[in-house]
Image (cartoon, rainbow, N blue to C red):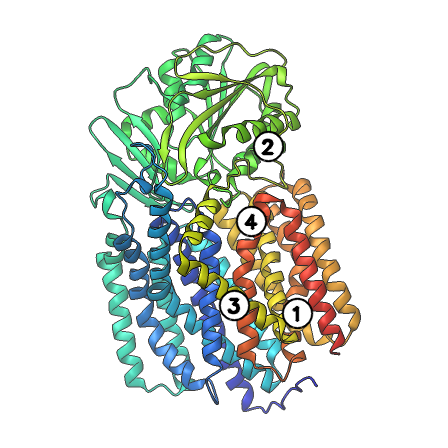
Amino acid sequence: MNAQPAPVTESARPARGMYLAILSLLAVSFMLFQIAVLRELRFQLSTLFTLTPFLFSGVMTFIGLGSLAAGRVVGTSQRILGWSAALLPLMLLPLFGAVITMPQNIIDYWSPAFSYGTGPWVPSTGDLYLRSIILAFLAVAVVGYGPVFFLQGVIFTLYFREGRQEGILSNVYAVDLIASGLGALLGGALSFVLTPVQTAVAAAALLLVTLWVAFRYLGIGLPRVAVVSALGLALIAVELGRGVLQWFETPPWMGKELAYTQWSRYRRIDVLDFPDRLTVLTDGLPFHHHNRNDAVHAGHPRALAALLARANPEVRSVLVLGAGTGSDVRIFRDLVPRDLRLVAVELDGGFVDTTRAFPWLWNYYRTADIVVQEGRYFLENSPETFDIVLYAYIDPQSAISNIGLPDANFMYTDAGLRRAYAKVRPGGYFVLSRVYLVNEADEFVRRLSATLLAAGVPPAEVRLYRSRETAAWGYYGQLATIHALVKKDGAPPAFEDPRVVPVAWADGGRPTTDFFPLSMVTGVWFGILVEFIRQSWLGVVLVAVVVLALLFRIGTSVGHFNFFLLGFGSFLLESLVLFYSFLLIGDPSLSAAVAVGVFLVWNGVGSLLSMRFESSRWFYAVVPVVVALYALTAPVLNVQTITLPVGLRTLAFSAHLALGGIVAGAMFPIALRSFGRERVSSMFFIDLVGCALAPVAFWLALSFVGIWLVGAGAVVSYAVVGGILATRR
């Protein structure tokens, strides 16, 4: 039997409104803190994004543990809410301090595992790296962000339990989802102007506001409110005035006296200024090197395109995609003395701001027409053509790992290369420079060759070269550079230079497409992880115990099986949404904020409509069809709207997301009501276990099979859940 709504008296309505207002404020605060943590850990763990799915999984795990703990709470949640409202404003900044400092105290940044571009590489770096990172990750989870999300799990589970008891579950869940969605949108907007520390401060300040809004309703004494407020404001004032956490933020190996540092909307950028060179670091990793006194750029792998322009007087215009801090602009100006029009396109305006801080470098960069824009969007919309189009090592960090964020890789798909090739005037040149792993060179060349061919570039127009020099790159191995030199409508000249070696075209590779955008797919990270766990008996035992416990839990209860699949399917769908947002919108921060925020808002609408949906068995058959329709039409929408301004693309993406978002949001409250005799805490926990496993499954499927498997997994999950719920009507 479904729980029936309890009668609502006039006096109960204001109390219920306050109850939901507290939930909404807490949801926004938790989301802001989560965004701050994820941005900060990407910098502190220095993992080339490889821990991204595990960071999401870690948050879900602690929310799930909080859900289990909530099962022990008897009676009303008001007391728990009261203590949480009083403690959270004081917890957030100290715990965020642990997020910053724990990795710095555990990771050995001076070990070979964290050597990038210097020193010889040795095989043992894989074990060194993983041991260091896993310990740091676990420490941060337990004493950093974990307690906050544990409390979130406790609070939200109690809300869902009481909402089901009072017959207002749809409203409670909708408020949680809509507020979390708005929190994601707000966090994305704030990431344009605030650092992670400042975002954590904003979350703490919002929790203080929540305390003052809720203290009478929750029965918190005014003296306690005053004390908590004084202490909370003191913590905020110290951070805003002294920047304590921001001072600790810089890892020890970088030194505290950086020449320049900033958090752009995409990454942290630091500059080390030496007498002979300037080194730019992004998220703690070497990114650009500028030798002050080298006007001939001897041995510099970026010089190939400029040397090509110097040897061809007809070259008058050059498009540089991925201009960064202006390395390529400087090389062109030094090596090509004639008047040359340069258009420099760079996604991250933070690189341009960084260059401005160093006048000697800015004097080069400003001679180009600088366009701060996503490269694929520029290619799709600019009417210009050029004598040379240069792919200048576009964000190589995002492409090293097979679970790297795919935003830059959409430049390397067959569609992206086709648009770049179209921008080259007849007889002009397209030059693509990439980094790759030496031990996977053959596969990389096959994939690159296949992608160029799929982009409509004839093999006769292509010459491939690799750099002679290699460099150690952390635990991955030796890193080298490959250059693809393409002459449109002709055979490219042989390029003789002691710094490069010709590479033969290789057939038989799998082309990189918008459906499979990872152009540098490597199994190194997963291979090292599997080997590391295999060699550790404790790791093997823990993994085996967790897997067996999960199988037993979902295999002996229809309810647990249902909620596990529901969580797994919903997060696969959300991962799919994120994937398509990166392709369509281009700006990673805006993409993530819009994808998560709008998806949760539509989920909230679905929750509000859930009681209307659940009475019809046809609804459960429609759900997987709608999810499949979203998965199939999202790439079509992207192709049709990618040439529009980003605002219109965002609106189109948001409206289209209603397809899957509303039905997905309706399923959780329907399921909780359908399994009315099951404990909310237990159901919510197993749902979150599914959510925690889905991000890892998404990146694995995307990397090794393709995006279609993610969509198929979401459809199958919702089909099974819909079948289970339909039989319980």
Q: Position of residue 364 (x, y in %)?
A: 35, 24
The tag earlier along the polypeptide, 3 or 4, is 3
Left or right? Give the position of 578 relative to 311: right
Locate residue 648 relative to residue 541 in the image: left or right.
Answer: right
Q: Nearer the viewer, residue 525 or 322?
A: 525
Q: Amino acid at mark 4?
A: Leu
* Residue receiving disc 4: 700
Q: Secondary structure at mark 1?
A: helix
Q: Residue at x 29, y 43 (%)?
A: 261
Marked residue nearer the N-terminal end (2 or 1):
2
Mark 1 vs mark 3, CA separation in Å: 16 Å
Amino acid type assigned to the residue bearing label 3 in the image: Ala
Residue 116, image x and y in percent?
33, 36
**3D distance between C-alphas at marks 1 and 4:** 28 Å
Residue 547 or residue 378, whichever sits in front:
547
Q: Quadrant of residue 396?
A: top left
Name the residue that disc number 3 marks: 179
The spot of residue 284 in percent (x, y) is: 33, 43
Which residue is disc 2 drawn over? 416
Q: Give the residue drawn at x 56%, y 79%.
A: 680
Q: Would you say the residues marked 1 and 4 are in contact, meaning their CB atoms lie under 8 Å apart? A: no
Q: Residues within 10 Å of mark 2 (few under 14, many from 20)?
A: many
Q: Could you tell me if the residues under marks 4 and 2 are in contact, i.e. CB atoms within 8 Å?
A: no
Q: Are marks 3 and 4 in contact (CB under 8 Å)?
A: no
Labelled pair 3, 2 in contact (Cβ < 8 Å): no
Q: Is residue 312 above or below residue 58?
A: above
N-term mark: 3 or 2: 3
The secondary element bearing badge 3 is classed as helix
How many discs appear? 4
Q: In the image, which is nearer the foreground, mark 4 or mark 2? A: 4
